[in-house]
Amino acid sequence: MFKRILVANRGEIALRIFRACRELGIESVAVFSEADRGAAYLEMADEAYCIGPPRAGESYLKIDRIISAAEVGNVQAIHPGYGFLAENSHFAEVCRDCDITFIGPSPEAMAMLGDKNSARKMARLADVPTVPGSEGLIESEAQALQLALQFGFPVLIKASAGGGGRGMRVALNELALKSALQQAQAEAEAAFGSTEIYLEKYVEHPKHVEVQVIGDMHGNAVHLWERDCSMQRRHQKLIEESPAPNLPAETRKAMCESAVRLVKLANYHNAGTVEFIVDKQGNYFFIEMNARIQVEHPVTEMVTGIDLIKMQILVAAGEPLPFKQEEIVQRGCAIECRINAEDPEKNFRPTPGLITRIIPPGGFGVRFDSHVHQGYTVSPYYDSMIGKLIVHQPTRAEAIACMKRALRELRVEGIKTTMALQEKILNHTAFIEHHVDTTFIERTWKT
């Protein structure tokens, strides 16, 4: 087992990993930018090192500075959390070259599944349904048009190295295709340093369902059931839940088994998420794999009782999974609301600033994962999420009631947040009956 782990991240997920390390008897080393200097969550680590200025490109994304901090901190492993370098196969390779364990998949598996184009090829080899689309990357506008006419408009242009909705554009007709290609490539280059794109048929009004998986170094791989992430805006998730409501049992079983086939074929170790869309006819299609822990992992933890961060650390240390597939059972219903420092009434504009007052909720089945506190200043340099509110109850109706109560109880003053909108969503008949899809917010609320 590791003695010391460096956490190459910040905020809520860094704190989550510090806590897991403490419970496992492992010392943790934090890194921070000048923007995060003095943040209270850093006190949970055993040591902390400054790695640069506020901008992520000069701190949290600087591989050489993180490796230097790891060497000074005398760590055996690095946990990347999510975002930043979590899906950077080069970073994982540098860790290996420096004899530091990367707590995540191998660089080879990450490169294979983290790139959306190669992941789709792997999915086809694993007999996992994929959305009809280009066999490889788009090389020209003429090729894109030929494929679009073959599959029929609308089509979706996606960045091969993309994530979080960046580098994605929908083209409704031939006229819109050219600008969609240019916009997707420009956004992809700015966000990921790559202009590689591919094209697929756009599935209208789909549900977004993902499967949590984890594999060890002993040939074992399992799924930890699914999460519904359909409630999102601009491909950014707002509410997640498990089990996915209104999903037929046979579809759930087939989807989860498909996810396991894929990770086994890729020889994938550690935690990951296989993402699918489900059309109006109930057909499911693979869209991508996130080769890391997800923001919404607490939803799965609550319904399975399995600590995914601890499992990541144990698997990276060479331990076999302590459970078999048949032992992993979904119990009750869990819902998560991502609390973002954003103003939904102004197109979800970020609202950085000073939190003058915060009162976290409590009570049976309520969990609030957050690094912020009264007097904390939300930085404009990073993601706007300030916390995750999770509830777990025996039934979905009880979970919705509990979440509404917890949202009312949670007070965040000094900045605008997404909580008021999330409360409206939870009271909406369409959400209660789960007649929603990934376009629900755009169609229902004008922001």
Image (cartoon, rainbow, N blue to C red):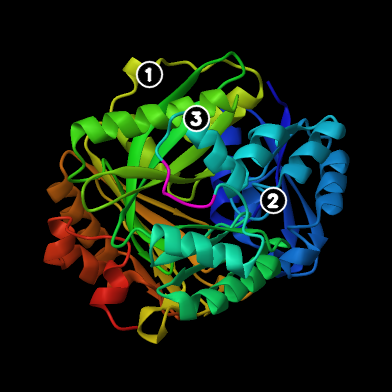
Classed neighbour count for the residue bearing mark 1: other residues with Cα under 10 Å, few (<14), some (14–19), many (≥20): few
Disc assigned to residue 85: 2
| Residue drawn 52% across the image and 67% down it | 145
Towards the viewer: 198 or 166:
198
Q: Quadrant of residue 346?
A: bottom left
Disc assigned to residue 262: 3
Location of residue 378 with respect to 69 vertically, above or below: below
Classed neighbour count for the residue bearing mark 2: other residues with Cα under 10 Å, few (<14), some (14–19), many (≥20): some
Which numbered disc flags the more N-terminal residue, 1 or 3? 3
Q: Quadrant of residue 73?
A: top right
Spatial CA distance of label 1 from label 2 is: 30 Å
Instruction: Tell me the amino acid under the disc marked 3.
Output: Leu
Towards the viewer: 258 or 82:
258
Instruction: Tell me the amino acid under the disc marked 2.
Output: Leu
Residue 132 is one of the magenta-drawn residues = yes
Spatial CA distance of label 3 from label 2 is: 23 Å
* Magenta segment: 130-134
- Principal SS element in the magenta part? loop
Residue 439 position, x and y percent, is 31, 67
Classed neighbour count for the residue bearing mark 3: other residues with Cα under 10 Å, few (<14), some (14–19), many (≥20): many
User: Could you say whether the residue bearing mark 2 is in a helix, strand or loop?
Assistant: loop
Instruction: Tell me the amino acid under the disc marked 1.
Output: Gln
Left or right: 338, with 121 as reference point: left
User: Could you say whether the residue bearing mark 1 is in a helix, strand or loop?
Assistant: helix
Left or right: 57, with 284 as reference point: right
- Callout 3–callout 2 Cβ contact below 8 Å: no
Q: Quadrant of residue 54?
A: bottom right
According to the picture, the residue beneath numbered tag 1 turns out to be 325
Disc assigned to residue 135: none
User: Could you say whether the residue bearing mark 3 is in a helix, strand or loop?
Assistant: helix
Residue 84 is one of the magenta-drawn residues = no
